[in-house]
Image: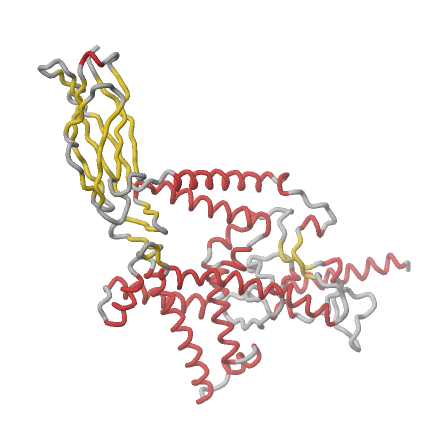
Amino acid sequence: MTDSATSAEQQAAYSDDIYEDAANWHVNTGEEKIHPKQAAGKWRKLKWLTHSIWLILFIGPFLRWNGQQAILFDIPDRQFHIFGLTILPQDVWMLALVLLFFAMLLAAVTSIAGRVYCGFFCFQTAWTDLFMWLEDKIEGVPAKRRKLDAAPWSAEKVRKKALKYFLWVVISVLTGISFVSWFTDARQLWHDIFTGQASGTAYGIIALFTAGTLVLAGKLREQACFWLCPYARIQGVMYDKETILPTYDFHRGEPRGRLKKGKLVEGNGDCIDCKQCIAVCPTGIDIRMGQQEGCITCSLCLDACDAVMEKIGRPKGLIRYASMDEMEGKKPLPLFKRPRVIIYLTIITLAIAGIIYGVTHLGAIEVKVLHGRSPLFVQRSDGSIQNKYDVKILNKTVKDIPIKITVSGIDGLQLKGAEETLLAKKGKTGSYIMFVNVPSEKLESERTPIVFKAVNLDDPTQTSSYESMFFAPK
């Protein structure tokens, strides 16, 4: 028998083994609790770094700006205050653009590098990682945790479980309070909570967040990613053959086999079937079986495999970020040649442009003018023409401000109804009836543009203009 024939038979036999393993392998649907091993390496460090972005949840409400809470989503008064910028319901279109931006960003990143958000930025992943880290420190490594769970209740088991759940509850309560702090004065909220003066709504939301955090991060863990998260269900349509994902190099690793006398067996691949990639996986999948719904692209299997390869003197990267095309020996396409990515990036760019335009044109005051329709004009006894207008002034600041209204566009016009300074209430829209009179000899057409201008007398740099029309007889 030739070497090629022998190799073909070995490959066929190995393929049969792979299919048998795949048939016996199953997704954990919650019948057993996964106790992942705490991994160490560059990807683990990167995960802790990206998870730290959620510290903004706890410290954000305490940032101050001009003596006020820097970020406050004031639902009762329908105002969003962000570092001196006040966004009112009239500016909700910008919120739509922000949501569109993040949705397309998520789609673009997924198309390029898989579920990076799930693995590195998702709040469920961050809180679950923290909870499991505490569990590891209190109850020990996975083997000890399984043994403790199976052991009868004792003073030691009660002590460890009580300490773990106490810390979990503390984190969950802080999470709930921090969430509510974004919607009310944070300092006052903490005072009211511990003096029993907070509203029932605040206590209720804190209780819901506490329970939700405990259930999602402490109890469900990976099951939330499998069965509750809609993103896990739609990720498949965002992938293509150029998407880079944590991938097991089948060509290099197979046929797998354990070490003998500390050395690789001749003819075997680099995978020594140590199962460390499974041991560290928070969802309990075997990355060697190919891409699966449970993979959240956390990259912990890369750290685990690289550590093993280093110990046995083999090159790192048996499990690495790679695309299907790369595994098939094809040259990856540049990003600018991938239609899906181009579409995502185009929408992202347009959304950013819209947001920038909205923010730069979001003044402290806004004036709008409605022309009276019944009648369009009135001819006075002195021959002048009079038009009626409903002037609406929106104050987007956090204090009452004095406003002066002026009109320009026609020589000799007179504005009636704005002789005195107007007081615009904070966060409110005021409506004022005004009249514009123009001598008939100054009019050259039946429609003439005029411009209303509102000026904040406390800060003359804050102005808003609106162009309307002055109507006259033919």
Relative depth, front residue between 170 and 460: 460
x then y, percent, for residue 350 = 48, 38
Specify the color scheme. Answer: secondary structure
Q: Is residue 54 above or below residue 234?
A: below
Q: Is residue 54 above or below residue 392?
A: below
Farthest right residue in view: 1
341 sits left or right of 360 in the view: right
x then y, percent, for residue 107 = 52, 47
x then y, percent, for residue 322 = 67, 53
Q: Residue drawn at (62%, 39%), measured in percent from left and top? A: 336
Quarter of the N terminus within the rendering: bottom right
User: Quadrant location of residue 258?
Assistant: bottom right
Farthest top residue in view: 474
Farthest left residue in view: 381
Relative depth, front residue between 314 and 257: 314
4 sits left or right of 271 in the view: right
How many numbered dots are placed on residues in this image? 0
User: Quadrant location of residue 207?
Assistant: bottom left
Relative depth, front residue between 86 and 442: 442
User: Quadrant location of residue 320?
Assistant: bottom right
Q: Residue drawn at (72%, 69%), measured in percent from left and top? A: 310
x then y, percent, for residue 305 = 67, 66
Q: Is residue 285 above or below residue 449?
A: below
37 sits left or right of 464 in the view: right
Farthest bottom residue in view: 155
Quarter of the C terminus within the rendering: top left
